[in-house]
Amino acid sequence: MTMLVMRVSNLLAQRIEETLRPVIGTVMATVSLDVETKRIGKSPDTVDRADLSTLADNLANALRLVVGQDLAEAAAIKVRQLA
């Protein structure tokens, strides 16, 4: 039997990570969410829908160096749409 262990209790944070995984992989999605929520004074467990626009902007800027502008913007749009 396989057991799925969730890293964060916040469903929105889980959805953000799920959105980022295909673009940057599991580890980078987790790290990016941690870093960018801290940047706005929160944690993955406390991020909420009101934070999505700022979080998406920050993620786009950070991911641009890793995956290029087009993929970074596409990921940011998907994060914004979680609202």
Image (spheres, grey):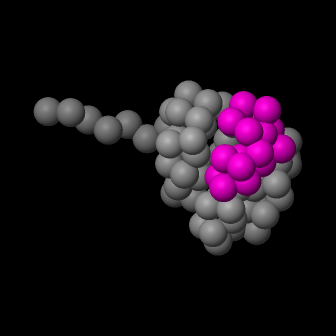
Task: Say whether residue 59 is visible.
Answer: no
Q: Is residue 34 left or right of residue 23?
A: right
In the image, residue 25 above or below residue 77: above
Q: Which residues are magenta?
A: 59-75
Q: Residue at x 77, y 45 (%)?
A: 69
Q: Is residue 63 magenta?
A: yes
Q: Position of residue 9 (x, y in %)?
A: 52, 49
Task: Residue 38: name its quadrant.
Answer: top right
Q: Main secondary structure of the magenta part?
A: helix
Quick one: 46 or 70, which is closer to the camera?
A: 70
Q: Position of residue 56 (x, y in %)?
A: 75, 55
Instruction: Locate residue 12, reporting x and y percent.
Output: 57, 58
Q: Examine the rendered structure and indicate whether residue 65 appears above or below residue 42.
A: above
For the image, the number of numbered tags is 0
The answer to whether residue 8 is magenta is: no
In the rendered image, the residue lying farthest to the left is 1
Name which residue lies at 78% across and 63% down: 53
Write the residue at 76% across / 68% down. 50
Task: Name which quarter of the figure residue 3 lies in.
Answer: top left
Q: Residue at x 78, y 39 (%)?
A: 64
- Quarter of the image for the C terminus: give it: bottom right
x and y percent of residue 45 in the render? 63, 48
38 displayed left or right of 72: right
Q: Nearer the viewer, residue 71 or 78?
A: 71
